Amino acid sequence: MTSIDEGQPIIVAQDVGKQVPMPGGALTILEGVSFEVKAGERVAILGVSGSGKSTLIGLLAGLDQPSHGRIRLAGEELSALDEDGRARLRGRTVGFVFQTFQLLPGLTALENAMLPLELAGRSDAESAARDLLARVGLAARAHHYPRQLSGGEQQRVALARAFATSPAVLFADEPTGNLDAHTGEKIADLLFDLNREAGTTLVLVTHDERMAARCGRRLHLDAGRLVRDER
Amino acid sequence: MNADRLAWRFLRRDWRAGELRILLGALVIAVATTSAIGFFTDRLQRAMVRQSAELLGADLVLKTPRPAQQAWLDEARARGLRVAQGLEFPSVVLHGEALQLCDVRAVEPGYPLRGRLRIAPAPDAPAQETRELPARGEAWVEARLLPLLQASLGDTLTLGRLSLRMTRVLAFEPGSGGNLAALAPGVLVRAEDLAQAGVIAPGSRVTYDTQFAGDPEPLARYKRWLAAHAGTGAQLVDVHEGRPAIGSALDRTERYLGLASVSAALLAGVAIAMGARRYSERHFDVSAMLRCLGVTQRNLVRFYLRQLLLLGLLGSGTGVLLGFAAHWGLLFLLSGLLPAQLPPPGLQPAAFGFFTGLVLLTGFALPPVLRLQRVPPLRVLRRELDPLPLGAWLVYGAALATLALLLWRTTGSLALTASVLGGSVAALAGFGTLAWSLLRAIRWPMKGAGVAWRYGLHALWRRPALAVGQILAFGLVFMAMALTALLRGDLLSTWRSQLPARAPNHFVINVLPDQVGPFSVFLREQHIDSAALYPMVRARLTAINGTPAGARNGHTHDESLRRELNLTWSRTLQADNGLTAGRWWQPGDEGQPLVSLEAGVADRLGVGLNDRLTFDFGGGQTLEVRVASLRTVQWDSFKPNFFMIFPPGTIDRFPATYVTSFYLPPGEQALMAQMVRRFPAVTVIDLEPLMAQVRQILSQVTLAVEYVLAGVLLAGFAVLAASLQASQDERLFEGALLRTLGASRYQLRAGHLSEFVLLGGLSGLFAAAGAQGVSALLYDRVFHLPVHVQWPLWLLLPPLGALVVGAAGYWGTRRVVEQSPLAVLRGL
């Protein structure tokens, strides 16, 4: 666990920009993005497709390096860490939920949920993962493989995996984007419930206005720039 | 829209996107390897055949008691073959008071068609190759004739009414090497001189030698034509039949090279199958989209077949060109060791390489690509909808059929095809089960290992089907390599032992019965190691079970029915003979009408135990005997051996001379002169020139074999690369996800390493078991070598497999930790 008290900034982005080289010259995806997220906050990142939302949370989580600017996550300067350092930081600080679930197809629901615990060397990995699967309502399907589960069930497994290590920050990239409205609603409820129980900071990328409305703060991106910070 | 153009456009797009590299790469490697081996071995094999032909003096020799008919010669020339004629006959030559029975060979310009005569200006001078023939009025003679005639070069010998000046010493004469029937010293003269000599009269024992040389295909067709037209009095000899020692060496080489090239094709096939599977999986979305857009299943299949055909033409063409280039590289690297003049590269290896590529693609790539027609169109909405997998029988059936075709096409041997295929299928089924159970078993002892290591191992047993498949694939690679190395090692050692360091290099014949004692004493005094002295009685086989031998249907072409046979008697069985049926002589058999037959000749004569054979010893003396046993004989031991052995006392009353063989170290020629002076009737035949040629052939065979092994190794690496490539996407995704979840590079890399080390170790273990099994089959059924436990396989293969697969897998998966996890996850 990371020792950032409630109310202290847990994510700090300063003048973050990202360019990718393309055949016709560099393509700017993000430019001059600066903001802070305090521990325990719930932040929704909104914007149309291609506005740079997913790139931004990838950078915030240390999955990729910004072309310029600085990002601090849980008190650590990301640019000062190498890839392994960032991996260790993610392992103890960060949880993820993806739009496309990103479960390992060769592992059962239980094994997928155990993954971050095993990586952290936790000896109680299996029992902790079972508890979480029970919490998301999938106790009976622990030994099913992802292809045997519906989309909603797969996202529940992903939620169990994301909360397994009790992360300080949870990044969710359109977690209901691949689900029907009804299932999406249930997943969103589960996400916010788990978030409240764990006291996790939540950074959520979404198109869904109703989901965004449940967050205390909304950052609007347009063409790679932060255009509105709405509380 | 033109379907071909559409297929071509898709193919180009796939190429640009990097989708085809694995498949095309594996195909190119397959075809390049097979055709490089093909070009190289084709030329080397033809060179070896040519060298054997140099011993024979031609590619094909027809021996007839009368001159060859003009029609036969015309037919040969019409088929583009070169022809040379000559004749051989025994005749007495004189010089002053001395006279000597000689083996006279009369030749025309053009002789020999293959190889060169070697002559020397004096008996002790070094011999040199020559393209010339004796001039008219001259004779070239073997060195041993000069002391026998008490003559020297420049003197004149008399042959019938003809006087010939002896101008050169004949050191090597193609066509005479190893011909033990021609035991008298050789004399080479011009055929044009013979008419004046008057030595050839009706009834003379003349053998007309008609020699042919040319390209293998027309030659083989002509041989069949001639066999049908020449009738029974004629004998046809080619390089495979002429000399037992060379014949079996060439035979084994060709079988071996064939086997090795199929191993390479098999490995490449595995690589192609892996590449095709990846290609197919990456085209699920495209196929679903095409079907959504209204393309029927039938047209989808056609579309992919077109792509496959284009790919095949492209890959095979490139492969043949690369293979052609690679074989020149090999030749260049080896230029110092190869025969100076290799035959030019043929078209046949190119055609075969091309054919191999298309066949491999059909057998190994078609099934996974056919799976694409089953992609449900709904996949455009639900990406997780994969097409139904194909029936296992189709996938493995196609691969097996392909292999069987290639094996059969390469080896021409159904026995070899069946044994290799049978061995492989049995190995796959048995090993698949074994690999599965082993994988399950290792889960428990690994529970206490570190997290990264545990993950590497989990990666294997959590996807058991993939793991078993990979273990089998790598196992197959190592098995093929081990088999190749094993056969190479054993074949070579068999050949080496076939020619021991002190193998007899001189044959002695015509030792008269009253000289057997003194001659043995002489050999002992001179510390010469010799085989026993065997009596030799000449006779013809005239009847089998009372029926005249020539009249029996189906067995009339055997040589033993036409010429005089050398019979012997012996109380003991020779060490290099083995009894296969019946019993050897026992007390009381002395003088009984019994005979022991060599198994091969018994087979050719259609004779078994207890059949009765009648021999004609000349002068109206005949003897009927019963077959009491059958023996195998190691003909290439260079020791005296006999088709027919009688018990002591049965044929002793007929005139006999004695034969033996011995080893004489080089430079002991003075001893020979001494021997000839003390035993003037004895004929000594020097085998050294023949054996030098045999050794040279063997050393070239060794070389060919080494290079074929290198080709198989290359194909093995292709499989390794293809399997790593095939699992690359999955590994990238998994690696990215694990890193997202906090795994360090070290954890990932250690996991990869442990996965591949384990994979390689298990593959090595399976390869050892498989190679042991298949080699036992091959040794027993095909090469007729004794079967034994191959301990080095069991000790070396598992650690070697762990090392090679571990290192390659570690290297091959380095990209997994090099790419940004975000890029990977978003790219999906």
Image (spheres, coloured by chain):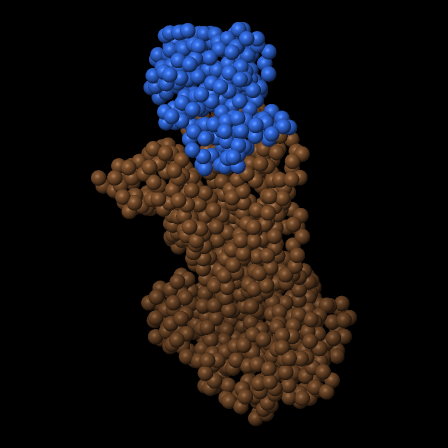
Chain colours: A blue, B brown
Figure check: B601 above or below B695? below
B434 or B411, which lies in front?
A: B434
Figure check: B806 above or below A54? below
Residue B597, picture quadrant: bottom right
Which residue reaches farthest right? Answer: B525
Which residue reaches farthest left? Answer: B1
Is the N terminus of chain B in the top left, top right, bottom left or bottom right quadrant? top left
In x, y percent, where is residue B184?
A: 58, 75
Is B103 situated left or right of B502 in this image? left
Residue at image x 60%, y 31%?
A: A126
Is the C terminus of chain B in the top left, top right, bottom left or bottom right quadrant? top left
B144 or B228, which lies in front?
A: B228
Which residue reaches farthest bottom? Answer: B620
Residue at image x 63%, y 44%?
A: B441
Total count of labels: 0
Residue B113, picture quadrant: bottom left
Is B351 situated left or right of B631 in this image? left
In x, y percent, where is residue B485?
A: 59, 51
Figure check: A149 above or below A72? below
Residue at image x 56%, y 68%?
A: B244
In x, y percent, where is residue B315?
A: 38, 43
Asked if one can make out residue B382 in the rendered structure from this viewpoint, the answer is yes
Figure check: B21 above or below B694? above
Is B328 situated left or right of B647 in this image? left
Residue at image x 36%, y 16%?
A: A209
A133 or B559, which lies in front?
A: A133
B612 or B209, which lies in front?
A: B612
Asked if one can make out residue B268 in the rendered structure from this viewpoint, the answer is no
